[in-house]
Amino acid sequence: MALLFFMGCSNSSKEKELQEAFEIHQKSLALRENLNQLLQAENLSPDQKSDLQSLLEKWDANFVEVPGYEHSHDHHHGDEGHDHHHDHHHAHKAPELTAPEHLRLQQILYDQLDSIHRQFKK
């Protein structure tokens, strides 16, 4: 009986960590969209745009989904059934990690993107 209790707690903890990881993933998607808008802005020089584009491409290459949430993005577009041609298509399949590792990975990815944002949002 005690073993079942601990297994249940472990599962609950795993689900909570993956939910937190997904929430950070969502924040990354929103920030990435913001950076896309910044990339289109007129106030960046061509060199700055090139630098930003390069940094975003590198970040996109490392951006991964959270297991169990692969198709659970909030789109906020108002039209159900729209085509999925937005920036979150850059998220790659989640690697084989534990729930705490996924949480940490999503936090690292967000922190990297936030650093890029702060660098160009002057």
Image (cartoon, rainbow, N blue to C red):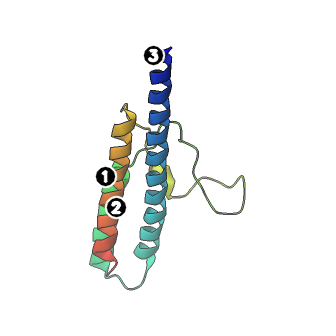
Q: Are marks 1 and 2 in contact (CB under 8 Å)?
A: no
Nearer to us of marks 3 and 1 is: 3
Q: Is residue 78 visible?
A: yes
Residue behind mark 3? 3
Residue at image point 35% right, 49% down? 61
Residue at image point 70% right, 63% down? 78
Residue behind mark 1? 108
Residue at image point 50% right, 33% down? 12
Q: Quadrant of residue 102?
A: top left
The residue nearer to you, when weighing 18 against 40, is 18
The numbered mark, 3 or 1, whose residue comes first in the sequence reads 3
Residue behind mark 2? 113
Say left or right for 57 vs 7: left
The image position of residue 18, as x and y in percent, is: 46, 40
The residue nearer to you, when weighing 88 against 118, is 118
The image position of residue 7, as x and y in percent, is: 46, 22
The residue nearer to you, when weighing 52 against 108, is 108
As drawn, 92 above or below 1: below
Q: Disc 3 to disc 1, how far (Cα)? A: 34 Å
As drawn, 98 above or below 58: above
Name the amino acid type tagged 2. Answer: Leu
Name the amino acid type tagged 1. Answer: Ile
